[in-house]
Amino acid sequence: MIQITRREIFNAAHRLYNPKWDKDKNFEVFGPCSRIHGHNWELFVTVEGHINEETGFVMDLKDLRDIMREYIISKVDHTYLNDDVEFLKGQLTSTENFAISIWKILFPVLENIGVKLTKIKLVETANHYVEYFGK
């Protein structure tokens, strides 16, 4: 087994805001991130599988690119994550929750084509990223 990774970049705004709390409590917990702000996000998707003897690939990275763009990037690029993205509705748009939501979407798609999703890495800033490996 070998792993390969594809990176895609997108822009999106969000705010960390718990609707159960008032504005002051949100600012106390989340600071300036309780206000709407944007990021240049990086999404890394890592899959694992056997190398196909005919192609030398685990999977064609163009296919992985197309899957990432169809199922995730097209839905989140240049959006306000809190309101515009259906798969994030009803949850805090923390990087952690965002990464888990991406996993839930991509896992069955990739499994269906014969590769195993092993990691989602979502970079919010140069100093902050999460890695999610499934349950």
Image (cartoon, helix red, strand yellow):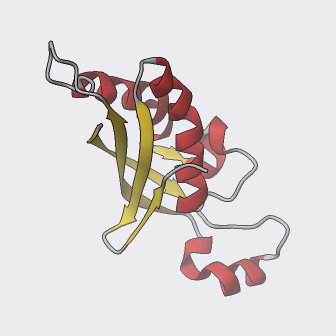
| Residue ID at (72%, 53%) | 91
Residue 102 position (above or below residue 53): below
The image quarter in which residue 73 lies: top left
Give the left or right position of residue 44, taking residue 133 as reference: left
Q: Which residue lies furthest to the top in this view?
A: 54
Rendered location of residue 2, percent (x, y): 26, 39
Q: Which of 70 and 32 is in front in this view?
A: 70
Rendered location of residue 11, percent (x, y): 38, 49
| Residue ID at (37%, 43%) | 45
Residue 4 position (above or below residue 66): below
Rendered location of residue 21, percent (x, y): 82, 74
Q: Residue furthest bottom?
A: 28
Rendered location of residue 127, percent (x, y): 34, 75
Q: Which of 41 and 38 is in front in this view?
A: 41
The image quarter in which residue 7 lies: top left
Residue 55 position (above or below residue 98): above
